[in-house]
Image (spheres, helix red, strand yellow):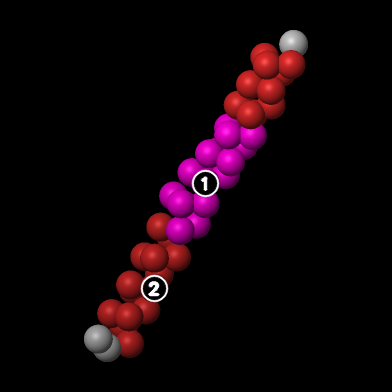
């Protein structure tokens, strides 16, 4: 792999992580926490 191809692959990986993976993980964590709080409120009244 030459430097240009490697740089392009690293840029793609960076964009994939920052644009897709981190927002999806953030929504999943916040949603999971909200569900947990709601479920505990349902159980404890």
**Quarter occupied by the N terminus:** bottom left
Where residue 27 appears, x then y in whole percent?
Answer: 55, 38
Q: Nearer the viewer, residue 4 or 29?
A: 29
Q: Nearer the viewer, residue 7 or 27?
A: 27
Mark 2 lies on a secondary structure that is helix
Q: Are marks 2 and 1 in contact (CB under 8 Å)?
A: no
Q: Earlier in the sequence, mark 2 or mark 1?
A: 2
**Quarter occupied by the C terminus:** top right
Q: In the figure, residue 36 lies in which quadrant?
A: top right
Q: In the figure, residue 14 lies in which quadrant?
A: bottom left
Residue drawn at (69%, 23%) of the image: 40
Left or right: 40 in relation to 27: right
Is residue 31 magenta-colored?
yes
Residue drawn at (41%, 57%) of the image: 16
User: How many C-alpha atoms fall within 10 Å of the one at disc 1: few (<14), some, or many (≥20)?
Assistant: few
Mark 2, residue position: 10
Main SS, magenta region, reads: helix
Q: Gap in Å between the C-alphas at discs 2 and 1?
A: 21 Å
Q: Which residues are magenta?
A: 17-33
Q: In the figure, residue 31 lies in which quadrant?
A: top right
Residue drawn at (48%, 44%) of the image: 24
Which residue extends farthest right? 45
Which residue extends farthest front? 44
Mark 1, residue position: 25
Where residue 17 appears, x then y in whole percent?
Answer: 45, 58
């Amino acid at each position: 792999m030459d430097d240009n191809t490697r740089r392009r692959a690293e840029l793609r990986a960076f964009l994939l992580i920052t644009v897709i993976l981190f927002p999806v993980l953030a929504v999943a964590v916040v949603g999971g926490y909200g569900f947990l709080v709601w479920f505990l409120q349902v159980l404890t009244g």
